[in-house]
Image: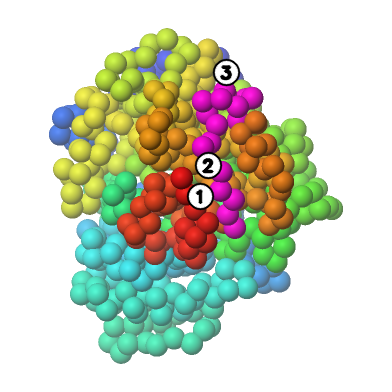
Amino acid sequence: MSRFVAKSLDGYKKLYDESINSPETFWAEFSKNEFSWIRHWDSVFTFDWSKAKFSWFAGAKVNITQNCIDRHLEKNGQKTAILFEPDDPNEKSQHISYQNLFEEVNKTANMLKSMGAKKGDRICLYMPMIPELAFSVLACAKIGAIHSVVFAGFSSKSLSNRINDAKCRFLITSDGGLRGEKITPLKKIADQALELCPSIEKVVVVRRAKNEITMKAGRDFWWDALIENQSKECQVEIMDAEDPLFILYTSGSTGKPKGMVHSSAGYMVYTNFSFRNVFQYKPNQIYWCTADIGWITGHSYIIYGPLSAGATTVMFEGVPNYPNPGRFWEIIDKHKINIFYTAPTAIRSLASHGQNQLKNKRLSTLEVLGTVGEPINEEAWQWYFEHIGKHNCPIVDTWWQTETGGIMISNLANVTPHKATFATLPLPGIQVNLLDKDGRELKETDAEGNLCIKHPWPSMARTIYGDHQRFINTYFSRFPKHYFTGDGAKRDADGNYRITGRVDDIVIVSGHNLGTAEIENIINQHPSVAESAVVGYPHKKKGNAIYAFVQLKTQDQIQNFNAEINALVSKTLGPICKPEKVQTCLALPKTRSGKIMRRILRKIASNDLENLGDVSTLLNPACIDEIKENRIND
């Protein structure tokens, strides 16, 4: 076992101190011994904060796919690399060994090369959660092409925007995607998008849903026909450490997505390091992250982190409530899952179904639970700990971003203590700072401020594709010599961090800074509340006031509900935190990754109903009309 995986609280502290006091030596020693390099580096890292220029392992030659697959073959070729669980519970699961994965990725890589794909080309992947998506991601990396995965729930407009921004030459998609009882017509959506995408030369289509589609002669090709006679051997492309690995789009405050560019070597190093430390993965464990590969969580902790560590990683095609709300728990028992990593949104949704879903579910193989995507509220944390972990599993509450590439703040399972609603401590190598609004460091242990990082780390994004100035302006201009996360955080007396939400989700009421996540946490403790979203809106007397949008567990009207919410918030946080308005709604507007679109709710709360911006990327855009119609007027 590597000395770079902490095994005790004292071990974590020693590792952390070493990483802060001698970061160059720390990352050099870890990286040299844990990966297969074609050529070692000339320098471990260089950086220029003012120009937002960062490099890691400059001069090194490496290939991430070789490190995720090829180097494991001699000892673990027959070990399951990817365990694929289909949408339909009656369809057989697939156990794809490292040897199988090696062959399928090579065939896919050769298919791409036969189409003319080469190093540096951008290839868009608009696919469901099927093995061919994993093959395609790893094949792109093997030949040095830059993959740009677009979540298979996005609209044609969102897809075309991303293809055009990255100037992709090729698109890989599917006839359709299976999600519960629905078929998402991916090829039809792609066809609509491609009417506006002149850069696309060829489209490869995987047969999955077997729905009726149109194939355009000379442009569209079936995956199975192209892959059939491809060789199972493929030479890896030798990549420079700083060569781009992928572009992944994330939401911007302006509504225009940002194409975050991640590099090859640094990203490889840190996703491996963070996966092994946070989850404390052991060689024979089965690990399941329920995210979609269309998001950074899927990139880092379904594909690259686990596979580079030689793990068995689960890919799930379906949704948590199909064919019933117990699907997650059935899969855990079926495959004897040891590590389970999911989102607070899923936890809250499943908790709302009560305990009947857990009847006859053993969950006895679980050893570690994880949460990702947004701050988890107290009620969901306790339900997860009690009913899923049976009080025996630590919950790693991970804070990180698309931009960071890997987990930045989290407890380490059974190594450092967990604490409900707290991400707890930064990982070794991550130098966290809390700054006030004027950029002054808050040195006291018990403090609250802007969450910033004061030293580069290997997996940080290198730029926004095609717009480095936006990269500088967004992340490095507000606080000199810091990466500004955009999040606020509290630090307790023990040095644990709790994420309070986006800084633009801080509401200033009568001169008081109020974190919306904290207020939501209290509202969500009401027994009738499924989920809530709190935003600020202009108020004549207070400057700003609080507007709470609340989704109930049932649609039954509750007498004195608003008074109960205000009493709960007032009692817990103080009268200043009481919502001025509490509006119940059928559903909260969410992105397809499950995040609540507070930007839209702020517009509605402010009565700016005609300027909501693009709502095409919402999972449930129809809920907007219901919320607008029932908006509470002054």
> In this view of the protein, can residue 31 be seen by the observer?
no
Q: Secondary structure at mark 1?
A: loop
| Residue 310, image x, y percentages | 52, 46
Give the magenta range: 569-586
The residue labelled by disc 3 is 9
| Sequence order check, earlier mark of 1 and 3 | 3
Which amino acid type is marked by label 2?
Answer: Lys
Q: Secondary structure at mark 3?
A: helix
| Residue 387, image x, y percentages | 75, 41
Is residue 462 positioned above or below 496 on the image?
below
Q: Is residue 348 magenta?
A: no
The residue labelled by disc 1 is 632
Query: Who's the residue at 34% across and 42% down the image?
Result: 403
Foreground pick, 410 / 442: 442
Which amino acid type is marked by label 3?
Answer: Leu
Labels 1 & 2 near each other (Cβ < 8 A) = yes
| Sequence order check, earlier mark of 3 and 2 | 3
The residue labelled by disc 2 is 581
